[in-house]
Image: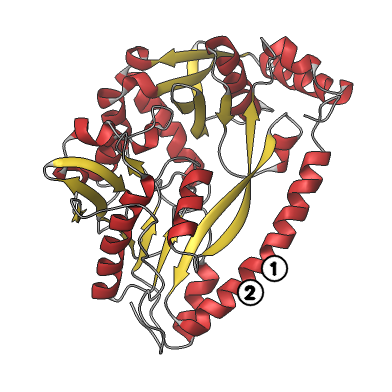
Amino acid sequence: MSQGSKPPMSTFTRPAAGSSADDLSGASLASIDEVDASQWDSLVDADHPFLRHAYLQALEASGSVCEKTGWVPAHLAVWRGRTLVGAMPFYRKYHSYGEYVFDWAWADALERAGGRYYPKALSAIPYTPVPGQRILVASGLAVETVVEVLAGELKRICDDEALSSWHFLFGSETDVSTWQRQWPALMAREGVQFQWRDKGYEDFEGFLAAMTSKRRKMIKRERRLVADQGLTLQRLEGEAITSQALIHFYRCYSITYHERGRPPYLNLDFFQRLRNAMPDALVLVQAHLEGRPVAAALYLKGNKSLYGRYWGSEVVADCLHFEACYYQGIEYCLEHGLTLFDPGTQGEHKLVRGFHPQRLCSLHYVAHPGLEAGVAQFCREEAQHVKAYRRAALDALPFKVPE
């Protein structure tokens, strides 16, 4: 992984105090199918469906993640004998699409200087900018012990293949801190995402009651406008999501991408596999007009959280996106006791509808010493702007009393 005179990952691994990985071994998996689903899922947080074996397997088996799409699986596994005790999603990437932490300028800078940025190493969930667990650890085993083994395997792959960099995206605060202790030289990049959290509202009216009069009236007006256009909303869960409903959803989802002049990242087979393998995690919101579905939003859920991910519409209708992708999600959380709603990326339009700005942190290693220095400076300067933006966003929240 060395480019220039910098020793490859020279500061990468250091044993964690009091840990021993002598009886553990690391390996790389060319497919998620190389590990038993029950072993993998025993390590996954029940609130994070995107790390479930079935989700990753659907990505790979559908061809949404493969060499052709520029995502080559190489998941890192930690074994004690034949028992999986740790893991981390890992990919060789041949571009930077579908990541949502943008490094195109870094790649351009290195390649203009005569270097090679791709392939690179990436630990993330493909096409899914959802903060959460990235390090999987068996109960009773110190996370530092697992990360020590993961680090060794990561070092081996990156050095052997001369990969330009490694990127750890949308990890939980705990996972980020663990990697920073293991590898202090990692560069941190700040970000912001908007999330809704239940503050004891009890129902949607209670949520609105906590807001300023201006925003409360705005949301009521938007919801009323959707109804005035003759649109009605319906939620389908789990096995109630029929094949016909899923096909219609996919048609709507595809429209969103085609309007931007590109094909969808995910294919219909991926969503069909999700419905077949993990229906318990799916919530489909359909919008109907004159008795037929015309728009749809697909959510995933954990045991405490709801994640809004995919949306599309066959019609142009005022405020329908807000209703299907935000208000239906908040209402669902309040009705089902879920305490967090992550509606997806991007911003200010979520802020005025009650979504709080949450700090994000990604971690980066760049092998080329010149590029590393430039990226480090960029990250420091960007962090100051991001912190100021988050402070301003907090001040702009639409609640009567700051939450």
Image point (31%, 40%), residue name: 141
Instruction: Answer whether residue 172 is visible to the viewer in this image.
Output: no
Dot 2, crowdedness within 10 Å: few (<14), some or many (≥20)? Answer: few
Disc 1: which residue: 381
Name the foreground residue: 190 vs 83. 83
Q: Position of residue 348 (x, y in %)?
A: 72, 42
Image point (37%, 46%), residue name: 143
Name the foreground residue: 362 vs 237. 362
Disc 2: which residue: 377
Residue 11 location, quadrant: bottom left
Kindly report the distance in space between the C-alpha atoms of the residues bearing marks 1 and 2.
Answer: 6 Å
Q: Is residue 67 left or right of residue 236?
A: left
Tag 2 secondary structure = helix
Image point (20%, 41%), residue name: 84
Q: Is residue 5 above or below residue 127?
A: below
Residue 14 location, quadrant: bottom left
Dot 1, crowdedness within 10 Å: few (<14), some or many (≥20)? Answer: few
Mark number, residue 164: none
Kind of residue sitting beneath label 1:
Glu
Contact, mark 1 vs mark 2 (Cβ under 8 Å): yes
Image point (36%, 71%), residue name: 118
Kind of residue sitting beneath label 2:
Gln
Q: Is residue 154 left or right of residue 301?
A: left
Instruction: Answer whether residue 373 is visible to the viewer in this image.
Output: yes
Residue 195 location, quadrant: top right
Q: Position of residue 337 (x, y in %)?
A: 55, 13
Tag 1 secondary structure = helix
Name the foreground residue: 117 vs 134. 134
Q: Is residue 235 left or right of residue 277?
A: right
The N terminus, quarter of image: bottom left
